[in-house]
Each structure stands twice: as structure tokens, then as C-alpha cells.
Image: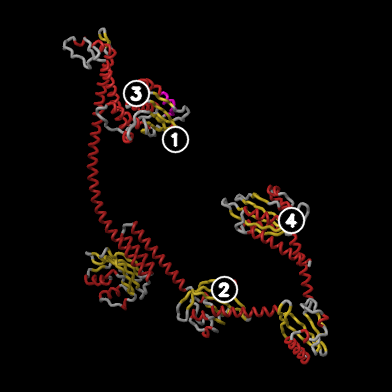
Amino acid sequence: MAMIALNIMSIAYISKVQRVDEIVKSPDFQPEKIALLETIAANLPGMIFQILQRQDGSVFIPYISSGCEYLYELKPEAVQADFQVLYKLIHPQDIKAFTESITVCSTTFKPWHWEGRIITPSGKLKWIQGTSQPERQETGDFLWNGLVMDITDRKQAEEKLQESETRYKAILDAIPDLMFRISRDAEYLDLKSEGANVTLSREEIVGKRVQELLPSDVAAISLEAIAKTLDSGTLQTCEYQLATPLGVRDYEARLVVSGEDEVLAIVRDITERKQAEVSLQNLAQKFAKAFSCSPDSITISTLQEGRFIEVNDSFVKLSGYERDEAIGKTSFELNLWVDDRDRLNLLHELQSTGVVRNLEFEFRQKSGKIITTLLSAEIIDLDNIPSILAVHHDITERKQVEAQFRLAAQRDRLLAETLVRIRSSLNLEEILQTTVTEVRQFLQADRVFIGLNNAKLGVRTLAESVDPQYPSVLGWSTNDEAYLQELRNLLKDNLVRVVEDITQIAVSPKVKAHYQKFQTKASLAVPLMLGNELFGALIANQCSGSRHWQPIEIDLLQQMSEQVAIAIQQSQIYQKLAELNTNLEQQVEERTAQLQQKMQEFEKLDRIKDVVLHTVAHDLRTSVMGNLMVLKNLLNQKVGSGEVGEQGSREQGENPSPLPPAPCPSASSAQFPIPVSRSIIERMIQGNDRQLAMINSLLEINSCEQQGIEIKHEPVQLSTVLGGTVTHLEPVLTQNQATLKNLVPADLPLVMADGTLLQKVLVTLITHSLQNNPPGLNFILSASIEEGMIRTQIQDDGVVMSKLECDRLFDLHVRDPQDCCSTSIGLKMYLCRKVIKAHGGKIGVISNRKRGLTFWFTLPLFTSSATNCP
């Protein structure tokens, strides 16, 4: 009972270990399952671990369970710090097996499994079992999730069980079969039953008769055997069945004479042998059914000669030979092998390996048709005769389908390549020649050519590919109208003309002579159509004999004819385009000459315009400057006892006349002062100032357009430039009762700019707002960094503008002639945009929703590479 309990405990323990082992080996083992394994491991002496093997060969241990301390008598932290301490605990006799298992696992990345012994620091000997499942990480590293279990108890139980089994086996081997001594009258005289499966004791058997202990049928068999043994004096054998606690068992009794009127019966349990015989019979029946019912051909033939011993019905259907025609004959006598060397190769392979699988061979049927099969064969021993069991799987139809697929693929490739050539090349002769060459290669025909129909030249062969042993039709032509009409009729209604045997069709003597001249035996022709017009034909000839043209071949020629027709049409269009292009080039040359002449005239006019502009502007500038000088001197000059200006005006009255009285001409008129109102002189000065500014702007714009704006690039502190400009504008702002709030930060980065031109831009923008608004305007000046640029803004609270006015503000266009101020400032605004663009920035204006405008411009930040800018 103790042994039975021990065995049950061992089985339960092993089952639990195997369950944990399955979880560790599972491909979806993840760290989140550690909790489950920890729960299992809590009831088992084991340790859970994770080892990360990096691509550089280094090893990191992310996790080791608390079972490490119980199993190895080591803290998990000590193992994580140096996992080599575990190697030192392995039993010396098991180190080699452990190292080999790690090497195999690291090389193949298959699950790791190892059993061996360790010696703990306290000296205990333990058996452990380790399993692990590698997982490739996204980084390319490998994570090993595993479990190590203490299997010492299991190993000890296995050793004890093995010792017990060895001892019991020795005892059982020493005990003979059950033996009885039986008298002639069927009385049991003695028995030897140690170790036998006997339900009755010795006392219950000895002295009893066979009829008392055995069933009546078994007893009758036994009595008959006893009588025969004693009467004949020879060994008698009988078989029977008995119902036992283990079920119905089969027994064999061997009876020999052991004394006067006494036999010795040796009884043996032959249940297993009888079962094996039944299984063998069933197997033989199954094999016979599989052999006869298999859809594949199965044959059994001698190894050396290939003489058929047995064939099934599928072989009869496949080969065409009846069963009695094949059995006893060799495969060579039946002429089955298309290539006799295939049989020798098969024999060599079988003798080398004993088995072949799915080798492809060709066989000849009784009708002469060639078929393809996949042959699998093994060497078997049939009544001590080495034989071949062969299975043939017919793949003839599959091979035909594969061939059709290959032809279709070649056809599609040929069509695609032809289409690409037509689209990429305009050389018609090259396209036609390549087409006939590749079509002949695909069809494996003797000749392929293209004939074209020309209204003036008749029919002419333009391209051909032909086998050298047959005559060429290249260059052949004819003008015979009757012959041409017959050829057209042969291709009427755009049909394909298929002729498998020339001798079987009715044609005119001329066509027949043509066939004979060029040795044509079979023909396949498709028309080349341009719209509804028959332009020619693509023709394939077989000269070696008649030929059956396959549907895929006919389809290829039809599709190729369409592509060739496109190529011909494309060539014709190209010729027309070439002619048109020639005419167009002549027209372009004429127009170009005319344009060049006009350009020269425009250049002359432009030079004249520059001279006129410069001359007129210079003269006007000189005149205006002279007027200004006189007016300013007059304004500041004192004549007689009174000043010219407001004081003179007061002497003349409260409402002075804007024009002085006309002086009387006299020789001394220049010596008398001319009374002129001071306000008139000031307005004249202002007008001359504006005219001078406009003339200067015109001259500057003209110079800018001709030579560009000269920019002196240098690192500039924008806040300094803007601050200086604000200081310069203070008198103007004060005069116009305007205020300006400067919010520009002092720590802005440097910009590459011309400080003088930037000041002019800022003055122009503020002046524009002052001139277009009443006094009392308020400005806000600000700057910020945006996307590698410094953006400067001048915001006012004056009048607004429409979007169209904002878009056109910086354009150069003619303004209202009555508003000279507008014209002058407009020219300067245009120059502002030119200056900012020359700096590499942008400028614009935004009309605020409620009140005022916001002018803005951007400038690039200073960089070390920018110092090289001109």
C-alpha cells in the first residue's frame, strides 16, 4: 500500500511539473503570466526567471523569483548581480550536458530543456529541471522566460521504481509457465503456480478434477488432449479461452507424458499473441482494401528485375494493361519507361536510401501516349524477396495546365514588351523585325513574316524571321491584281485564317505554287487592319509538316496584329507630324526674326526713354532747386523797413491778396520790394519740396530698375536703428501732434541689413500715415521673432483702407494727377518694397477692423554665413 501511495504522489507531482513546463514552453508566455507561475511555484519547489540576451552578447537578468533562495540557497539579488554563481553549483558530471544544451539553444533558439544535479552551498545534492522559451524582441534582443524546478523527489522515486522493476523482472524471468500434473481420469495431482495469474489456491485445485474447475467446453477439450497424449505418447497442444478477473484470456496448453497414466500440462497465456494475430489480419485486410481501392496506381515488383508481382485496378486504368498482362512481366517488357535510364536512377536511389518520394517520371501507356507521374517507392521484404512498393500519381493534366500557364505568361510578356516598344520607339522597321522574331520563338514555327499592302507597290514582305533551312520570303512582292484579290478574300471579314494542312484545302494554282515555292505545309494568318481597311497580314508558316495551331497561339497572333497595326498607324502619324513640324519650324524661325527685330526697336526706345527721363528730370530738378533757393531767400530777406511775410501782410490789411499788384515796368523796378504773403511763399516752397522729392524718387526708381538697389549688408541691432529713427522723427511727430510708443525689445538678435535704408523705410511708412490722417495720430512700434525672421510692425489709429488699396499700396502705378502728394509718397512706398525685398524680407499692410493700419516688414536674422553676402 505504501508503494501504491508513493506512485500516486509521484504521478500527481509529475503532472503538475509538466503543466508548468507547458506554460513556460508556450509561444505566448509573457511577463504578465509571471503571477500565475508564482502562484504555481508557491506550491512547488521551483524558481521563475527572465534572461535578456542582447545583440552585443551581454546578458541581463530582469527577474528571478523568490524560489531561488529555496532551490539554490542564494538570494535573487546575488544571482541577478552575477548569474555565473549558478554555474558553480552544477555537479561536475553534469556540466558538459548543461553547456551543450545552452549552446544548442543559443544557436537554434529552440526551447531549452535540461535535467541535472546541483550541489548547494550547504552541501545538499539536488536534481533540478530547467525549461525556457526564447522570444525575439523588436530591438533584435532575445528574452528567455523560464522555470527551474526541484525534481529530487521524483528522481528518487524513479530510481526506486526502476530498482523494483528490475528485481520483479528477474523474478518473473525465472518463473516458468503454469504447470499441472494431471492423471488419466483428469484429477489434478500437483501444480506450480508461483507468479501465475491463478485465482484459486493450491489446496482448492489439487485433488479436484478438471470437470469440477473448468467450464464444460474447456473441460471436454482438456479431456480429449489428455487421452491423446497418453495414448499416442506424443506432445499435444490445445487452445482455449477462460473468463478471468482480467477479462477473457486466451491460453495454450502443451501436454506431455510425465508418468504412468499421468501428463504434465504447461499452460501459457497467449492473449497478446492472439490479439497481435488479429491485428495483423486486420492490417492485411486494410492494406488489401487500400491497395485495391487507391485512386493512384500501386504496384509491387521485384527489386532487381522490375517484374510485377501485384498491381491494382488504378494501374490497369493508368497503363492500359490488364492485370494478367502485367503480372509476371517486367516494366521493360511492357515498354513502360520512356527513358530506360530512369529505372536505373530509381534503383540507385532506392538502394542508397531505401525510399524515394515524389520523383517525376514519364511513362508510356499501352496506346503509346506519354504520361507524367509522381512516383513514390520503398523497398519491402516480400517472402524474403526484396521488392519495390511503388505508387504512381498521374500529373499529366497538371503539367499540361502548367504548360498552358507558361505559354500564357510568355504571351502576356511578349504583348507587354511589344506595347512598350511601340510606345517608346518610332522606328517601324525595328518594331516589325523584333515582332516576327519573338513571335517565331514563341510559336516555335519555321517562318513568321509581315506583309503590307501598298496602293502603288502592291503586296510586299517587310519583315521576316525564318529557319535557315527554309527559303526566305523577305522582299517578295507582287502587283498581280487577281492574285491580290484572292489573298484579300482569304482574309475577308477580318477573320483568322487557320490552315493545319495545306494539302487539305482548295486554292488557286497561283497560291498553290506560292506554297510549294516556299515549302509551306501549314499556315496561320491574321489581318492587319487600319480602321476598315486591310493593310496587311501577320503570318506564321510551318514548313516541316502539318501542324495543329493551339487556341493560345491563335490568340497571340490576333493580339500581336492589333499592336502591329497600332505601330503602323503611329508611324504614319509620326510622318505627318514630321512634315507639320518642318513647316512649324520655318514659321517659328520667321516669327523669331520678327521678334528679334521688334526687341531691338524696343531696346532703342527704352534707351531713348532713359535719356529723356534723365534729361527732363535733371532739368526739372535744377529748376525746382533754383525756385526753392530763391523762395527761401525771399522768405528770410528783409526789404526796406519791413519783413516780407506775415508782417508785410499785416501792413496791407487783414485780408491780403494772394497775388501782389502788378508793378509798373521801369528801369528801377528791381530795387523795390514785391509784397508777397508769407503763407504763399511757404506753400510754394512745400510744393517745390514735393516736386523735388517726386523727381528724386523717379530718378531713384529708374536707377533701381536699371542697376538694382545697392545694399550695404552688415550686422545691425534693429532696436538701435528703430530708436534712432524715432528720435529723428520727433519734430515731425510734434508738428503733427502725433505720439509714437516704442515697444521694440532691446535684446533682439542682430539682422543683416543696411541701417540707412531701413531708416528711410520707417520714415516713409510713418509719413504716409501722417499725410493721410488729421493731426493727433498715435503710433505703436513693435518687433518679434517669427520663423527665423524679425517681424517689425507700425500700428496707427487713423483711417482704414479697403483690401484692394492695401494690395496695391506698394505697387508702382499712376495716381491722381491732382494729388501730387499722393504720387510722391506712392513712389516712395514702391521703393520701400524694393528695399525690403533686396534685404530678403517681405513688406505689407493690414487694415484693422475698427480703426487704423498696421504696416509690417520682415528681415532675416544674422548668421555667420551671412557675413559673406554682398
- Residue designated by label 2: 348
Tag in front: 4 or 3: 3
Q: Main secondary structure of the magenta part?
A: helix
Q: Residue at x 82, y 83 (%)?
A: 206
- Residue designated by label 3: 775
| Residue 635 relative to residue 761: left or right | left
Q: Position of residue 273 (x, y in %)?
A: 69, 79
Estimate how packed mark 2 is, as few (under 14), some (14 to 19) or many (20 or more) residues with alpha carbons within 10 Å. few
Instruction: Reply above or below: 796 against 303.
Output: above
- Residue designated by label 1: 786
Instruction: Give the spatial CA distance, label 1 vs label 4.
Output: 71 Å
Q: Which residues are magenta?
A: 714-724
- Residue designated by label 4: 118
The amino acid at mark 3 is Pro
Instruction: Give the spatial CA distance, label 1 vs label 3.
Output: 33 Å
Q: Position of residue 51 (x, y in %)?
A: 64, 52
Outermost bottom residue: 231
Q: Position of residue 764 (x, y in %)?
A: 35, 27
Outermost front residue: 850
Estimate how packed mark 1 is, as few (under 14), some (14 to 19) or many (20 or more) residues with alpha carbons within 10 Å. few
Q: Residue at x 78, y 85 (%)?
A: 212
Tag in front: 1 or 2: 1
